[in-house]
Image (spheres, rainbow, N blue to C red):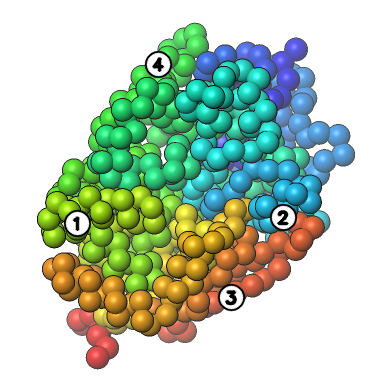
Amino acid sequence: MADLVLGPLLRRVDATSAVVWVETDAPCDVRVLDAHAPTFTVHGHHYALVDVGGLTPGTSTAYTVALDDHTVWPEPGAPPSVIRTPAPGGPVGVLFGSCRVAAGHDPAAVAAHGPDALRACARRLAADPSAAPTVLLLVGDQVYADAESPEMTEFIRARRDITRPPGTEIADFEEYAHLYHLAFGDPDVRWLLSTVPTLMIFDDHDIRDDWNTSQAWRDDIRAQPWWRARVTAGLAAYAVYQHLGNLPRDVRAADPIWRRLHEGGDAGDRLDAFAWHTDSDPEAYRWSYHQDYGGTRLVVVDSRCARVLTPGARAMLDPGTSAWLDGLCTGDRDHLLIATSLPYLMPRAVYDLEAWNEALADGRWGAWARRTSERLRRRFDLEHWAAFHRSSTALARTVMEVAAGRRGRAPASVVFLSGDVHHSYLTTVTRPRLTSEVHQAVCSPIRNPLRGLMRTANQAAAHAPPRVATRLLTLLAGVRPPPWRWRLRSRPWFTNSLATLRLDARTATITWESPNPEATTLTPVRRAALTADRPSPPRSSCGGPRGPVRRRG
């Protein structure tokens, strides 16, 4: 009799359908409500995605999971797992965050990593189901494939020699599977993921620190004999444990990964070959996706695997992904959300530093500066959107067109949602004056606080002297300034957190919350309104607002 190994994970949910993901210990038929699906096999592990249809918008439906007609979920004594479908025209709550280390909850683990914000969220929701968000968006580093933990090290030590590379880092699919069990298997978190729709996107630590920072980094890592097995296992595991559940049923049915999984037998080798191909050619596959919630559009962008790293022609997104994103950035909706694991609008001192570093690493000041700049890029993680300055500028111009009403009625807000940097902050575009409010909201970490030099550097970046110094560096290097200006709404903070973006008609607010020491609840630490109290702009005959873009100054 088959049993449940991990899950259920409630993944993509819309007004009438839902996707439920499970891992089992043997091939079987998986049933959720009136829907069922057979398992598929990858490297000896068995998985299923069950597409549940016929749901009613705006309702809550408790569900069970049965394997070959044997009910295995919910576990005895656990709260029920519920599928909540969004109501047409109703408010939308996007709970988001990034960077969560899977560690225990004993005093030593809490001292090292702080209380787990995701666990605290689960406990609050169990006590008050009305607090459930529309969607939980995990924007990177759901697992740490390159960081030691006692539990993972013990597992690795039992199966191979850790004195040989890659040591205690993840080496293959089997180890990734165990890492995901540690990340998603905590009882409280497991229940949370069974009852809150969850969307995900990777960042570097899902594969390895600094993944695809530069062509030089890529050349160095590909020279390591263990790297091919690592990156193929990482992308294959990401596809199974995270990516496929992001996709709607019709898109998944035509997806090349999905087709390979259902060609019969164990699909491990087929999936590994495809993963290596996608890592070698960023245009071979698009990991990005989107979902609409009534008047809100959420676009989730891969800002790691889609990179073009050719010196002098670097791009955050390959041409196909860039065109796809541009096509989704339109008006005639209330809110446009662009989720990218790497923050788009950094504090201005950091933004200018990264743009300057890219110019020097591309040879702007000669060979000596190129070598030094490459070392600085890796040492201080200078790899965000500003470090791909052409891509950053192009996206700014696209968003400005949306926010000015040149691509249909301007949304009330355009908000970038990000993580990665292990601190949280909010920035707001101030010039030019646009019809839409444009913001960058960062929530990081869920559980992995920043300490030491990097924390001090990020605190300092919020002050004026570093901004003056880095602006001078960009001028000396001939780097053009970005086409808009923005400001920090407050200095960054460094606590473990989750943020909730609440969208109701054309209003938007955001709240960051941190767990108490016992991780039994979350307490607000910052709140902000993201939309001005003003009416929707009128339509012109061509679909946009009348008149030119208003500018300040």
Residue at left offset 76%, top offset 40%: 187
> Disc 1 or 3, which lies upstream in sequence?
1
Residue farthest toward the right in the current orientation of the protein = 77
Query: Disc 3 designates what residue?
Result: 527
Query: Disc 4 designates what residue?
Result: 270
Q: Secondary structure at mark 3?
A: strand
Q: Determine contact: label 2, label 1, CB under 8 Å.
A: no
Between 443 and 126, the residue placed more toward the observer is: 443
> Disc 4 or 2, which lies upstream in sequence?
2
User: In this rendering, is residue 152 above or below 474?
Assistant: above
Q: Secondary structure at mark 2?
A: helix
How far is mark 1 from mark 3, CA to CA? 43 Å
Residue at left offset 58%, top offset 75%: 527
133 left or right of 476 in image:
right
How far is mark 4 from mark 3, CA to CA? 47 Å
Q: Which mark is residue 111?
A: 2
* Amino acid carrying mark 1 in the image: Ala
Q: Determine contact: label 4, label 1, CB under 8 Å.
A: no
Residue 120 spot, x, y in % from top left = 73, 55
Residue farthest toward the top in the current orientation of the protein = 265
The mark lying in front, picked from 3 and 2, is: 2
Between 339 and 177, the residue placed more toward the observer is: 177
> Disc 4 or 3, which lies upstream in sequence?
4
Q: Secondary structure at mark 4?
A: helix
